Structure formats: structure tokens, C-alpha cells
Amino acid sequence: MRVLLMPASYPPVLGGLQTVVQTLARALKERGHDIRVITNKYPRTLAPHEVLDDVAVVRWLFLVPRLRQLVDLRFDLFLAGLFYFPLTLVRLIFNLRRERPDVVNLHFVGGQAFFLLLARWFTSFRLIVSVHGDDVEGLSQRRDFDRWVFRALLRRADIVTACSRYLLEEARQLEPTIQEKARVAYNGIDLPPALPTRVHRGSLFASGRMIPNKGFDVLLRAKAENRGQWRLVLMGDGPERSALESLARTIGLNGDVVFCGNQPRSQVLSSIAEADLVVVPSRKDSFGMAALEAMAYGKPVVATRVSGLPEVLENADALLVEPDDPAQLAKAIESALDRLKHDSRFGLHNRERAAFFSTQHMSDSYLESYSDSRVMSRITTRDKLRSLLARRAVRGLSFEDGDPQAPAHLPRGDRGEAAHGGPVPRQRGARDVRPAGEGVPSPGP
């Protein structure tokens, strides 16, 4: 099967989405499928073309000119959008027509969404839309145009997947029409071949993008309530890093907290293996990749009871607390460390739970969506109808009463007859005639 993956971002950019899509691409490639990746060229210093894990990766600038950019005096962004928007759209359409992928799988409804929405007007392809978190949870904070694109793309997708039941339900509430074509495709991870030797050092580990939703400020305040009892390693980077470092100094955590910044994935996993306990203090977390990585290494987890975390940590060796409560978080961490002292096997059960979220299971879920026979049937019927209508329009012919090739389900006016019953005049130069619902409405102002 020829699969085009279109994530919002891809390695070497670090993050949970990037890790998941790269893992999926590698797994599908190993199973004999033809995999290609088209993603955003951001940061702009990234190579426009490269091969990673034997997978061809192409990066384009998916920019759309917006009036808001003029209001904000960002003329550079507006002009860049005017230039790159038609260029990238044409490149995408020609790429889809030339490569003819069996399926296009968008991961995260972001900058590429509007381009795919328009591309479906010019060429036919099977579209799987996979939502991953902030594209759903943060939609209310986006502009009307972005919300329209999100809903329109989900309506026109053949299958919609989400990385957790929680997130799928959130997406259904935003766009109820996806009910019959929505399904869960859990993120996956490769289990390490063997568990590391346990040496209790009283060390905690947390990682992720340093943004408010990750709740690292709550973790630092929890640490301040248990000074000297455990050491905290924070790995990751983001817009909140300087504020977090300032907070650590203000509350007197110098020497008790280590900020490591962004590190290669191998170093992240090595740090998990060395830690006694992994903490996930999120305010929102649609899946909980950090928790899954901890479980894969047989580590106990302390996490918040939010979003998809309870789903991932179901029946695991984990303690769940309410978000934004440093005192409760500190107490849970202390309880988990105390249990580790008396029960050396605390957390080992998590490896069994992590096996449910294996790379094999993840790739199976996506392949099931890619090859869904109902989707295939619907697309084949739609393509045949489009082709038939287009040929009729180009030849200047119309469907007459009794024409055996006229689609029976079309209303009388669509079968070549005017509303009053007379024949419809032939149209010269018509390029395309589409069934109702196939067009893309123009965005609002």
C-alpha cells in the first residue's frame, strides 16, 4: 500500500506527535508498505528533502495569507502567504496526481488542513484525519476560519481517528457528523528488550514541552514542599522554560532541580531507565506519551486525573491526583517513593500494560482504517459518479429521460431537465460537474 503521511511536524523536531508519526512510518515501512512524508518546513533551516529511516521526507511552507497579519503589521507573513499559498497548493495537487497514494493520513489538523481541503476539489484520494490533542482541545481559542476548516475537513474525511477515547469524544462534540466514521488509534511504543537494574536513588523524572498545559510549575511547587527528599530532573524546552527556571530559584530549589533542555530520544529513555519515579503533572494531556514511556520501562507513575491519562494508566501501578494541587501532588510522590522502599516490584506490572500500546497494535489500527472496505466502496462509487458527470459535461451532453447511464438517485433537475420539466441547454466549456456536498464552500471574511 502506498501511504502519504502528513504530520504537522516531523523529526528532527522533538515532541510526542513527531515521535508517534516517525514510529508509525518506520513500522509500516518494515511491513512492506511504500511510505512518504510531507510536512511543514519549520524551523525553516530544515532540509527541504531528506531520507530518515529509509522514508522520504519532503518539507514545504504551508502558509495562508490572513487579514489579521495586516492588522498586526506583519506584512512579511502576509506577503509570504500570498507567495507560498498558491505555490504549495499546486505542488500538493500535482504530487497527489503523480504519486496517486492509496491513502493520505493527516496527523494533527493544523496548517496543512486547508490545503488538503482544497486539494480534494481538484483530485480524489482517500483521506484519514488523525487528531492528536491541541488541534481539538485548543480549537475554541482559534479564529473562526480555523474552526471552519477543522469542521469542514472532518466532515469530508473518510475516517477520523483519535489517540484516545477521551479525545475522540471531544472531536465528536465539535463535529457530530463523524460519529459513524470515527475510531480510536492509540499511540504506540517499542518496548525495551530488558528492564534496567533497579537502584533506588530517590530520583524523579519529568519531560515534555515546557508550556502551561504540562503543569511543570505545579511540580516545582510540589518539590518545594519536600525539600531534599528527592531530586528532580526536568527534560524539555519551550516558551515557559525561563519562567520555570526563575520560579525554581525564587522558591529555593537550587541544586534540587536539573533543567536538561531538549535531548535526543535515546537520552530521554535513558533518563527514564535511571529514575525511580516518573511524574506527569499535566493540566491537559490527550494521551500521555510520557506516562507510556515510563510504563514501558517498568516505572511507577504519579500523574494527574485529566484528559486521556486515566485511560492510558488504567490498571497500572500509578497514583492519580487532581491537577493544580501542589500539596496533593507532593503527597502522592512521597507515597509512591515510600512504597518503592517496601515493594521493589512496584511499577514492574506497568510493562504488561504498556504492551497493549505496542507499535504493532498502533500500526494494525491505522492499517485497518487505511483499508476499510466501506471507505473503499464509498470512494469508488464517488469517483465513478464524478467521472461520468465530468465526461457528460465536457462533451456538452445532458442526461435525458430514459438515459440508462443517468444516476437514479439524482433529482429530476439533475438528470438534464429543468425544474419545469424541459430539457436543460447544453453547456459549452464546462469543466466539472459535482454531486451535491462535494464542493468546498468559500471561507468567510
Image (spheres, rainbow, N blue to C red):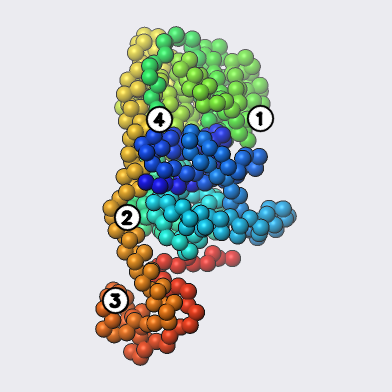
Which numbered disc flags the more N-terminal residue, 2 or 4?
4
In terms of image quadrants, where is residue 432? bottom left
- 200 is higher (above) or lower (below) than 378: above
Q: Position of residue 368 (x, y in %)?
A: 31, 45
- The answer to whether residue 241 is seen in the rendering is yes
Q: Amino acid at mark 3?
A: Gln
Spatial CA distance of label 2 from label 1 is 48 Å
Q: Which residue is mark 1?
A: 242
Q: Amino acid at mark 4?
A: Ile
Q: Quick check: 381 left or right of 45? A: left
Task: Tell whether label 2 touches label 3 (CB within 8 Å).
Answer: no
- 441 is higher (above) or lower (below) than 160: below
Spatial CA distance of label 1 from label 3 is 68 Å
Task: Tell whether label 4 touches label 3 (CB within 8 Å).
Answer: no
Q: Position of residue 95 (x, y in %)?
A: 51, 54
Q: Which residue is mark 2?
A: 375
Find numbered disc 3 in the image and state the secondary structure of the residue it sits on.
loop
Residue 405: image tag: 3
- Residue at horizontal 59%, vertical 65%? 445
